[in-house]
Amino acid sequence: MKSEDLQRSLLKALEKKLPNRTELVETLMEILFMEKGAIYRRLRGEVPFSYLEVVNIAEKLNISINNLIYADFTRVDRFELNVIEYTNMNEADYNQWEDYISLISPAKNDPFSEIAESSNILPLLIYGKFDSLSKFFLFKYQYLFGETESRISFDNLVFPERLNQIFHSYFNITKNFAKTVLIWDHLIFRYLVTDILFFLNTNLISRDNLQELKNDLFALLKYTEEIAVHGYYEETGNPVDFYISDVNLYSDYSYVRLNDIRLTLVRALILNSVVSTFQSSYDTVKKWVQSLKKSSTLITQSGSVYRAEFFEKQRGIVAEL
């Protein structure tokens, strides 16, 4: 569906839901945490509602997203690639991230909220507070998607403070879900160390940079081992089921549940995701993530020997740097 069609569908639905213009504006100001002028610009069509703004409005006003997107089509499951241009972020890119954080913030008030992720790449909900690692994933993105003639070194890469704060906020807010399920590829640190060594050997990462990354990786291993030992986040006390997959995971899948929101995300392009809001997509991906437990070992509050061996092995891999 074209963005313009989605905007028109939303405006029609809002007119039916809240025909009084003043009441509509005040309601949207409260939902989106925006000033009156920003709301009017969206209602006049001068500025489009972002996809996450649409999801937030629909959830708060009990408007069917399916009806908005597929009013004139046969209902089928659709995924949308939400591309944030990390090589040159603009206000819309920042807003997309901040909208998503606002969307999942109410998880702390839902005793049945849940977030689950199967990963072969370190997930942001774990590395988001470690600045060197956050910068590294941004660096890798810029290396792959930037202009080929200009390879920026790790030292010279500008890591915007606003983006860094967004990563910190996401890290903190994801600890508020009532339940978290993590399933990691057993080679997850080997993949990351291989990437780091590539950039070291191409002289884009210095020895000083390498030491910063090693320090963050050792700190992250200590942090995740504490989660595995206790079975909960120290920050909130919310439970975590932590698994290590004994088979390779070729893609990263995650699902989010809170209140009436059901989101399915598939990681793409390192820092982006393909997103679906359909219940059927949610059910399918949840079933897939849950099925991975059959070939995985639970290391939270159990499997103490396996857990100790796993983390000792990962420290050895990091020490190779």
Image: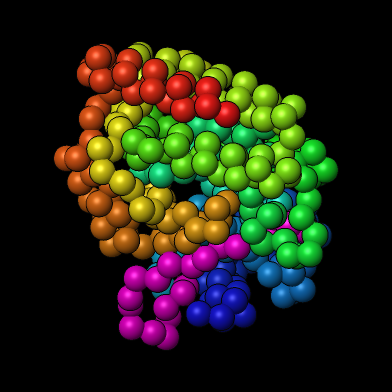
Which residue is at the far bottom? Answer: 72
From the viewer's perspective, tell me whether residue 182 is left or right of residue 1: left
Residue 136 appears in which quarter of the rendering?
top right
Up-down: is 260 above or below 136? below
Residue 231, placed above or below residue 157: above
Tell me the chief SS of the magenta region.
Answer: loop
Which of the image's four quarters has the C terminus?
top right
Residue reaching furthest front? Answer: 201
**Coordinates of residue 124 in the picture (x, y in percent):** 53, 39
Judge by depth and name the residue closer to the eye, 131 or 232. 131
Where residue 47 sits in the image (x, y, percent)? 74, 69
Is residue 12 at all visible to an observer of this figure? no
Above or below for 311 versus 139: above
Of 166 and 65, which appears nearest the observer?
Answer: 166
Residue at the image point whose x is 55% and y is 59% from the top: 269
314 up-or-down from 124: above or below:
above
Give the residue drawn at x 50%, y 32%.
Answer: 126
Task: Kindly tell me whether residue 251 is visible in this rendering.
Answer: yes
For the point 60% across and 62% down, the residue is 83
Expressed as whole percent of the image width and height from the top left, the position of residue 125 reads: 51, 35
Hey, which quadrant is residue 77 in on the image?
bottom left
What residue range appears in magenta? 68-91
Percent coordinates x, y for residue 171 in the rendering: 56, 33
User: Could you tell me which residue is drawn at 62 percent across and 21 percent down?
Assistant: 215
